[in-house]
Image (cartoon, rainbow, N blue to C red):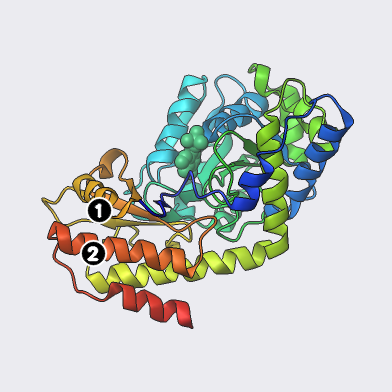
């Protein structure tokens, strides 16, 4: 009973305004009214990605955006360099291999961000690499990588590789600048910082990536960027778009622009710092070992050896009606993740942290009481 705390790093809480917009009656998707709404929805996203390029809207989850980016811009047999930062970078490798790419993986420990000098070394050793795939915020571990450093590594190696960046859980939470940072392909999803239900994905591509589309020999089919690029200007889609989600996108885009992307990032930074302060006060370990890579979107907390993070999460859900996120892959059952992304403010975070602290006590996880107060101090400043 009472408010359900959805504290996972996606899907995130959908604001009442967005829910209201999605309750509007459906429209003829080939009519002028929908076209105007869809074109405006796409245009509103440009300041969020910090780009002058059209924002491509793809009816799919984030995985669909990975697929689309590869299918449009690369060819069978192309070599791609993928630094391992956690579960999502590993899944990106898997889909790349399934689509016929040759993947060179840079091994990582899931506790640090991308090491740009490793990227530079790998690129210097192999001029045939066609693209570097960088996960900006690794949602499974709460580690954010320095994308500008990756760009510099490509430039220092005097390499022609395209830079693909997954911003699925970083956009509208961490600083990001598609044009300014020289990113070639940015991909994102609707269900995180965008404050929408799952179901839409996004891509922004550079002129260089557009040129690469001409020589790609993969078959993008449903994901073909060419009609989707023109749809982002005209609002006329090559197939039936999810009209309801477009209503939501239009409203969410308005909200994001009303707050302003820089203010959104500051709000997330503050929530993240408060959450980290609570975890440190409790005496628990943060999965990310490098403070400069702490995520604005999610904090992954390690439980002591022999404790089941999943059973702890189940208790918190049962007692406090709050969903914390599970550990994935090699940190399954070893971490729980507190999402502080999207439609969140100091009081929603305080509620979430209170639930965690009470849960620690009830589950018998040794900790120092008062993490909630430590967070409160950060939020008051
Ligand atoms: C960083 C990152 N990349 C990719 C994905 C996959 O997106 P989806 O589950 O929407 O297909 C996720 C999902 O959480 C993610 O966090």
Residue 156 drawn at (x, y percent): 60, 54
In the picture provided, is 235 more to the left or to the right than 357?
Answer: right
Label whose residue precedes the other's in the sequence (2 or 1): 1
In the picture provided, is 7 more to the left or to the right than 283?
Answer: right
Residue 201 lies, with reference to residue 194, above or below; the image says above
Category of crowding for the residue at label 2, using alpha-carbon neighbours closer than 10 angstroms: few (below 14), some (14–19), many (at least 20): some
Label 2 lies in ligand 1 vicinity (Cβ under 8 Å): no
Residue 206 drawn at (x, y percent): 74, 42
Task: Please identify the quarter of the rendering in which residue 31 is found.
Answer: top right
Residue 284 shows which numbered tag? none
Residue 320 drawn at (x, y percent): 30, 55
Which residue is depicted at the point 81% across and 33% down? 34
In the picture provided, is 125 more to the left or to the right than 24?
Answer: left
Residue 121 drawn at (x, y percent): 48, 48
Residue position for label 2: 358
Instruction: Between residue 163 and residue 176, name the one nearer to us.
Output: 176
Residue at mark 2 to residue at mark 1: CA–CA distance: 9 Å
Query: Is the Cβ of the residue at disc 2 closer than 8 Å to that at disc 1?
Result: yes
Kind of element beneath mark 1 = helix
Which residue is depicted at the point 62% across and 24% down? 71
Residue position for label 1: 319
Kind of element beneath mark 2 = helix
Which residue is depicted at the point 19% across and 73% down? 368
Residue 125 lies, with reference to residue 227, above or below; the image says below
* Residue 368 visible in the shown view: yes
């Amino acid at each position: 009973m009472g408010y359900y705390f959805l504290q996972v790093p996606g899907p995130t809480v959908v604001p009442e305004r967005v829910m209201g917009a999605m309750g509007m009656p459906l429209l003829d998707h080939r009519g002028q009214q929908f076209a105007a709404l869809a074109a405006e929805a796409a245009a509103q996203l440009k300041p969020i990605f910090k780009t002058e390029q059209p924002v491509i809207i793809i009816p799919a989850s984030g995985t669909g955006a990975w697929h689309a980016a590869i299918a449009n811009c690369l060819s069978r047999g192309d070599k791609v360099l993928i630094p391992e930062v956690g579960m999502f970078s590993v899944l990106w490798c898997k889909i790349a291999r399934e689509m016929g790419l040759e993947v060179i993986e840079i091994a990582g420990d899931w506790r640090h961000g991308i090491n740009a000098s490793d990227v530079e070394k790998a690129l210097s050793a192999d001029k045939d690499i066609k693209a570097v795939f960088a996960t900006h915020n690794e949602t499974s571990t709460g580690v954010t990588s320095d994308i500008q450093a990756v760009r510099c590594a490509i430039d220092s190696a005097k390499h022609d590789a395209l830079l693909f960046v997954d911003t699925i859980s970083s956009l509208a939470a961490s600083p990001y600048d598609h044009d300014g940072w020289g990113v070639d392909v940015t991909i994102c999803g609707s269900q995180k910082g965008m404050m929408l239900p799952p179901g839409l994905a996004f891509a922004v591509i550079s002129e260089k990536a557009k040129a690469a589309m001409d020589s790609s020999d993969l078959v993008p089919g449903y994901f073909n960027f060419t009609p989707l690029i023109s749809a982002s200007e005209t609002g006329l889609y090559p197939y039936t778009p999810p009209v309801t989600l477009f209503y939501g996108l239009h409203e969410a885009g308005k909200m994001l622009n009303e707050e302003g992307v820089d203010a959104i990032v500051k709000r997330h930074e503050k929530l993240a710092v408060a959450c980290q302060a609570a975890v440190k006060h409790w005496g628990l370990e943060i999965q990310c070992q490098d403070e400069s890579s702490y995520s604005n979107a999610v904090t992954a907390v390690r439980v002591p050896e022999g404790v089941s993070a999943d059973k702890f999460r189940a208790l918190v859900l049962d007692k406090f009606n709050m969903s914390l996120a599970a550990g994935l892959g090699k940190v399954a059952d070893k971490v729980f993740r507190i999402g502080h992304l999207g439609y969140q403010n100091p009081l929603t975070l305080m509620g979430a942290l209170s639930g965690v602290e009470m849960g620690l006590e009830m589950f018998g996880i040794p900790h120092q009481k008062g993490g909630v107060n430590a967070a409160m101090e950060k939020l008051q400043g």
